[in-house]
Image (cartoon, rainbow, N blue to C red):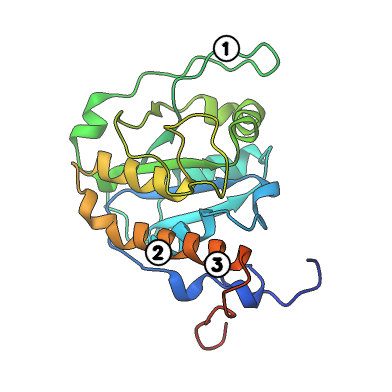
Amino acid sequence: MPGRPRCPACLRPRADCLCGLAAPVAHRAEVLILQHPLEVHHAKGTARLVHLCLPRSRLEVGEAFDPEALRAWLTAPWPGAPAGAGPHAVLLYPPSPPDPALPLAPAPPLPPQWLAGDAACLRLVVLDGTWRKSRKMLYANPLLQALPRLPLSPGLPASGYGSLRRAHAPHQLSTLEATCAALAQVEGGQDERYAPVRAAFAAFMARQVARQKGRVPPAASPAGC
């Protein structure tokens, strides 16, 4: 509810702080998370948790972004990036049927050499929102439509959300799960690297289930949170 004290790091109410669950892991590809404004304070949202777990990530909130700001987020070097050419921005987004209400420009093909090279040169762009919200974000930002798209490999396990958040199809995952799967995919199948992040997600889901049943104590937060 508005007015409750919030953690300045994860932006959640202090009683539901995520910081104690975060499990930072080393990863190669950069991650830019673009979060729809209606997802910021969603009780079951995972974008902030995966951002806390990925040191080479950035999270920005909006629906229609300022083009110059968005261009910088997509192309400007980040601290610790390899020297040389700028990052190759790739949009994590599945093939989607045409929608006359929200028409999109055809995405350019993903150059195979990008995936064959060093994953540290990639910047994975992730849209955090429901299917409809992410489609609106894509429609409102032509710079995102101009990015090559990376679909997830088939055969991934079903989401760990379970009954906590309804998915429209069995293959739909949370933002955290989809981001980890995509990172493992572009980093040559290094799936085990992201086990601590998925464990943090499982702990978060268990806490939400317990909270629904009135059995969870206030979250433990790091000092100063």
Residue 156 image offset from top left, x and y in percent: 31, 36
Whether residue 79 can be seen here: yes
Q: Which residue is mark 3?
A: 210
Q: Mark 1 near mark 3, Cβ–Cβ under 8 Å?
A: no
Q: How many marks?
A: 3
Circle nearer the N terminus (3, 2): 2
Circle nearer the N terminus (2, 1): 1
Mark 2 to mark 1 CA distance (whole Å): 36 Å
Mark 1 to mark 3 CA distance (whole Å): 40 Å
Q: In which quadrant of the rendered image does the N terminus lie?
A: bottom right
Whether residue 8 can be seen here: no
Report the mark closest to the observer, 3 or 2. Answer: 3
Report the mark closest to the observer, 1 or 3. Answer: 3
Specify few, some or many for label 1: CA neighbours under 10 Å numbering under 14, 14-19, or 20 or more.
few
Q: Mark 2 is on which residue type?
A: Ala
Front-most of residues 65 and 168: 168
Q: Which residue is mark 2?
A: 200
Q: In which quadrant of the rendered image does the C terminus lie?
A: bottom right
Q: Is residue 91 above or below residue 28?
A: above
Q: Is residue 37 above or below residue 101?
A: below
Which disc, if any, is residue 61? none
Dot 1: element:
loop
Q: Mark 3 is on which residue type?
A: Ala
Look at 44% across and 20% down and name the residue there.
Answer: 95
Which disc, if any, is residue 98? 1
Specify few, some or many for label 2: CA neighbours under 10 Å numbering under 14, 14-19, or 20 or more.
many
Report the mark closest to the observer, 2 or 1. Answer: 2
Dot 2: element:
helix
